[in-house]
Amino acid sequence: MKLDIGCGLQKHEGYIGIDLYTDADIKAPMWDLPLDTNSVDAIVSYHALEHVPLAQVNPTLQEWYRVLIPGGSVVLQVPDFLYALHHFISDAPDKNELWAQQLIFGHQRHEGEYHRCGFTVDSLRTLLLTTGFILQDLRVVWNYDQDSIQAIALKPLKEEKI
């Protein structure tokens, strides 16, 4: 089973769409998935985690970790908060202030389009590692007409005993 979490109106082909605010295959919050532990092979989530309240980010990543099979993967993209801030404070003559605000706060056309937190490369790295993921790749990519942070992470085959 492969999930597209926070899919909105367009899900990745071959994936089960999960979204709380649209008519997805499964209508559920991304931090409370109605799925069994170790039942998901792969998760993609593009520009969705920033819509979760800050206090819900860790529980959300822990939930994704829970449902993934050992060796399962997450491909996660979030807006680069530093990029958004740069454009917001820019005094460039061609600055589009509304666009800059939407980078930070979301489009806000409905409840699911508010940005409730922001991420940097370092903060996303820390969140994924402290959840227990093995980080395969972490980089800034261009997507959704902006710099986005993309992480590829795996659930370990065996969990470490602390």
Image (tube, rainbow, N blue to C red):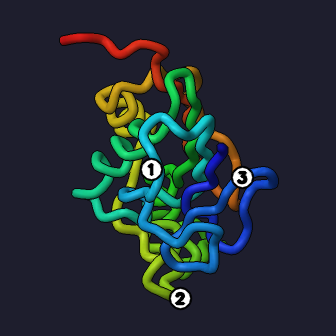
Q: Which tag is nearer the camera, tag 2 or tag 3?
A: 3
Question: In the rendering, at what x and y percent does residue 144 appear?
Answer: 69, 60
Mark before the other along the chain sequence, 1 or 3? 3
Q: Name the residue under label 1.
A: 82
Query: SS class of the residue under badge 1?
Result: helix
Q: Mark 2 points at which residue?
A: 109
Q: Is residue 11 above or below residue 82?
A: below
Q: Residue furthest left?
A: 162
Q: Do the residues labelled 1 and 2 touch (CB within 8 Å)?
A: no
Real-space Cα distance between discs 2 and 3? 26 Å
Question: In the rendering, at what x and y percent does residue 53 appear?
Answer: 30, 64
Query: Can you say which quadrant of the picture contains the C terminus?
Result: top left
Mark before the other along the chain sequence, 1 or 2? 1
Question: In the rendering, at what x and y percent does residue 63 appear?
Answer: 37, 46
Query: Can you say which quadrant of the picture contains the N terminus?
Result: top right
**Residue closer to the observer: 101 or 46:** 46
Q: Name the residue under label 3.
A: 15
Under mark 2, the amino acid is Arg
